[in-house]
Amino acid sequence: MIPLELYILLASIMFTIGLYGLITQKNGVKLMMCIELLLNSANINLVAFSAYQPNMNGQVFALFSIALAAAEAGVGFAILIALYRLYGTIDLDNINTMRW
Amino acid sequence: MISNALSLMILLPLLGAIVSFFVGTKAKFVALIASLAPLVLSLQMYMEFDKSSTMMQFVESYNWVPSIGVKYTLGVDGIGFPLVLLSTIVTVLVIIYSWGETKKPNQYFALLLLNEVGVLGVFTALDFFLFYIFWEIVLIPMFFLIGSWGGPRKDYAAIKFFIYTHVASLVMLLAIFALYFTYQLPDGSRTFDMLTLLKATQNPEIFPPALLNIIFAGLLLGFLVKMPAFPFHTWLPDAHVEAPTAGSVVLAALLLKMGGYGLFRIIVPMLPSVDKIFVTIIAIIAVLSIVYGAFLALAQKDIKKLVAYSSVSHMGFVTLGAVALVPLSIQGAMFQQFSHGIITCVLFMSAGTIQHVVGTRIIADLGGLADRMPKFAVIMMAGFMASLGLPGMSGFVAEFMTLTGAYATLPVYVMIVVFLSIVITAAYHLWAMQKAMFGPILRKYMDVHDPHAYELFSMSMIILLTLLFGLQPGLMTDMMGTAANQLLQPVVTLSEMGVI
Amino acid sequence: MYSDLAYLIVGLPVLAFVLCLFFGWHLPRGGGFITVLATLGAFIISFGIFQEIYPGDIVHQSMHWFGDFNVGILIDPLSLIMLLMVSLVVTLIHIYGNGYMNGDPGAARYFAEAALFSAAMLGLVYADNLLQLFIFWELVGLCSYLLIGFWYRKPSAAAAAKKAFLTTRVGDVMFLAAIIVLYNNLVNLNITLNPGEYLLQFPVIYAHIAEIPPDQLTLIALGLLGGAVGKSGQFPLHVWLPDAMEGPTTVSAMIHAATMVTAGVFLVARMFPLFYAAPHGLTAVAAVGAFTALFAATMGLTAFDIKRVLAFSTVSQLGFMMAGLGVGAAVGAFAVGVSMFHLIGHSFFKALLFLCAGSVIHAVNTNDMREMGGVGKYMKWTMYTMLIGSLSLAGFPLFTGFFSKDEIIMIAYEYGIAINFLPYIFLILAAVLTAIYTFRMWFSVFTGKERSNYGKHESPWVMLGPLVILAIFAFAFGFAAQHDFYNYLDSNFEHYDMDFVELGIIGGHALIEEHGAAAEEGEHASAEEGHGAAAEGEGSHAIPLHIQLLPYIVALGGILIAALFYWDRVKKFDPSQVTGDKDPIRKMLLKGYYQHEIMTGWICEGIVYGTALISNTIDIKIVDGWLNWLSAWVMGFAGHVRKVQTGVVQNYVTALMLGIVVLVIAIAAISLAMEVGLI
């Protein structure tokens, strides 16, 4: 079997890439994609752990997580569309009126 | 006699406030009825009040939140009852004076009645929790009165008033909690009962001196800010000047007495148990309030601000009498509170009438008004004379008793400074009167006329009252004397008195 | 029977006050007759009481008021003579006032205030305790304020009223302080009182003066003197009296000649035992009185407003009365009788002089003597009554003023022999000046050529009647009543439980001469201690003849000097030879020794108002300032802190992540430390 550490390494690299994207990207769609990366890295972790376990808990959990990710993506894009209609752009650096 | 008279007296204005809020322009009638009812009740209680009894009277006590030791306890004795009477009388007269209010009258009268509720509660509550609730209730109607119906700088004044007194009340609350948490009843539970806690403070084993000093300082701060005493008085001029006339009257006549009441009820019993330095500090504060307030009043250009500072000065006498710890001076200080409560009504009503009829309050711009407003001039002069302590009116009796008692324990130079301030007091009152009322009538004021009948009515009632209490002070001083003697004895709790 | 009605002496004028205040506008002459009837009623009752209790009884009634204080009536010889004089003079002045105020739109208000004043003055005089006296004292001051400022539309009148009230207030505060000190001292003595007795009642005070520590007595005496100085217009609180002439002349006559200003002298007389027992108490009284007598007389020399001359004269004569009481240090309670005699006599002739002046002013329509002259041709009755008054004031032999002033000067001489001649010298000089300025006034007004065009008619009989009655008193009271008066007043303090010799010892006096009162002799013989050396037994001094003649010389000489300067018929000198407008002394006297500038300018506007302005600045900048600074600081701080909320989502995410990192590291570190054993 592929060693567990490699799976975890893969997941953490994905997580880091997603996190970096989340923090630095201006484009709202790219932000959503990075959030997906984060979620999927967690999923990889879950499935990998489940492979080394006698039961299926990890994979089941990963299924739940995917469903949640889908729902959250739907809501996120709905917000983005509403923002675009209001501001004419999805450049998140310009959408900062809810501040001091 | 009606049972639960005190609760009824507090409840009726509350109901009146709610009803008048919804009634619209007829609110003044509702408010008048709602304020006359407590007046009738308090007069009836006066008839039944036993002036030589040292026990609490008209006591009601119900369990409210037994798990934390909060009870709904009301009761009056010689300290609180004169102030109860004062509150009911002043509220009626203020409502009559405001009969012509046109801007949102339903809210206006509702707020005045709410003030009465709060003030009556403070003077009758015998449980610290209840006391604090009523203490804070008063802030809200006054804030709105100043903030909505006030003068040019009303927002600043309202916020300043609210935050300043509220912060001081919070400090007082901390002290109350300290009292609450330190004392335990024999069965392990705690209580907020005022007299029980005060009695406990006189026991150095329960309350070690260091702790007691801190608690005392906290309570003292709360009351000094309310009175107001120098150097915590600066909220008063702004609040008074910007408030509408009725608001100013209620503020000066009732709210300031809350501080004085706390002084007598809570501070004076604790004074013998705390560090002697506090007596010196409070005495210095009192003298400075009297003198500094008098000089400040002399420097004012606005007649309402002048009257506001005169309130600071007069309340200084209350502090002075309280801290001298002699029965005559305490009695005099209580009477000074009562007397000032009555007299200050006519002073602020005069200032309000001048503003209303003439259009300006700046003394230098006034002149010769007595020519066109003769009835008002007579009343205003009577009021100003009463305020400067003319014998025949209540102010003189109060000042005389306070000073005579205070001479026994306070050093001579204190008295000399106070006497100087009496002359200054006469000076600014007369100067304001003379400039405003006498002299030739200015051409721009040729059209002014005497104020409305309802304004004259309330003001003349005040003058009659101050004459009444000046010629027959015994009506009030008897019960105050009993209370003053009682204050210098160890505290007796309600259960020991047998009234619960 | 009349004693039961004693409360009506105050009650009737109060009733008159209420009636005039509310109904006076509807009545003819503004309700003046009500006031006259009221004070007349008070006089009748006083006279009735006089018949009942002369010469040996007193009336004492009292009732509990509040706390430890009472209200009461005490009619002893001292208060009885004052009651009679006050009610009589005030009634006459009210009758005169009916004529004088005829046509004035504020007449009802005048009579109401005058009635209130009458009530207050009468109440003051027969008060049975010191607090009650003070209360009526202040009420009298209030009425004075109201009446001086009667024509309130005149700014000068309103200002004069304010000045009067404030100046007397300074004195009143000292009086109040004295009462408070006295009360506390009495409390400290732990006296057992009989039921119905109260600490501040005069009989109680008299009985316990000897037990009070002497330094406290001096303090009390000085405080009481302060009150008297204010009310009686002695230096330095005399500045309000000349300005008080802004009021109607009847007010000047009533309040500032006959009654209110005498209240100060009355107070010292009433509390004479305390002054006697206080070390240096009477010295202060004599000093103030003698100085004022001369001081005011000098200012009367240059005034050209007829009422101002009379005002200064009043101040000066009150100084005589004070000095008369003060030299009681040498002669004991006899001084009270002497001073009070001058007080009563002075009330008559000064009221007469003021009313005559009012009559002249009413006709001539000006106060300025420079515009008068030759008025005598048109106003014969006024001229002759004023002549009688002036002769009395100057101390012309046989007139009232001569007897009373002479006696004061005599006892001042005895004081001089025993202690100090300064009062005597001052009083003699003042007497000379009195004669001079009085007749300067009379000659300038009534004789000579008319200096301006004025109205020429005599006053109506409602005004002349009182003048005549007062003139009779001003002439005859002196020789008719002198001895009975002294005897009656000497018995005043015998009604009370006190020993003058004992008091004298406390006060450090040596009783030089015995007059009249028999009681003193008995106690003298029994006194063993005392000031061994001086006093007892020295007997009466024979006063040298030239000293006895001096008052005659002074009076006649003064009138002569005035005649030489001002009476056209014998005029030898012209005033302009002695002084002119550029003369600095004359300027100083005209300006009243610059007191207005010093007191109003420097002290009031400078020091007092300056302190007020400084306090105001302190209050705004510092006491309020720190508060506003605090709130500004809090708002500023909040302003900085809230910049964390940038509104940019990524920033929030970054913060979140950093927080998690910090948290993880912290947990790891803590668990590591716990494992290793550090925590």
Image: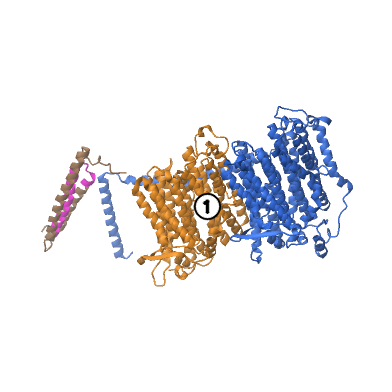
Chain colours: A brown, B orange, C blue
Residue, far right: C545
Rendered-image quadrant of the N terminus of chain B = bottom left
Does C467 sit above or below residue B222?
A: above
Apparent side of residue B249 relative to residue C236 in the rendered image (left or right): left
Residue C160, horizontal then vertical, whole percent? 63, 40
Asked if one can make out residue C169 in the rendered structure from this viewpoint, the answer is no
Q: Secondary structure at mark 1?
A: helix
- Residue A38 within the segment the image draws in magenta: yes
Q: How far across and how far down the image is residue C157, in percent?
A: 62, 38
Which image quadrant for residue B191?
A: bottom left
Q: Is residue C106 left or right of residue C49?
A: left
Q: Nearer the viewer, residue B232 or C588?
A: C588
Please state which of residues C118 and C263 is positioned toward the viewer in this rendering.
C118
State the predominant SS element of the stretch in magenta. Answer: helix
Q: Which residue is mark 1?
A: B465
The percent position of residue B382, horizontal first and vertical second, equals 55, 46
Three-letter code for the amino acid on which mark 1 is drawn: Leu
Residue A64 position by quadrant: bottom left
Image quadrant in which the C terminus of chain B is located = bottom left
- The span picked out in magenta is A20-49
Residue A21, percent from left and from top: 21, 46
Is C443 or C531 nearer to us in this picture? C443
Residue C260 colored in magenta in the image: no
Horizontal placement of C590 versus A88: left or right?
right
Q: Determine if residue C495 is in view.
A: yes
Of all chains, the one bearing label 1 is: B
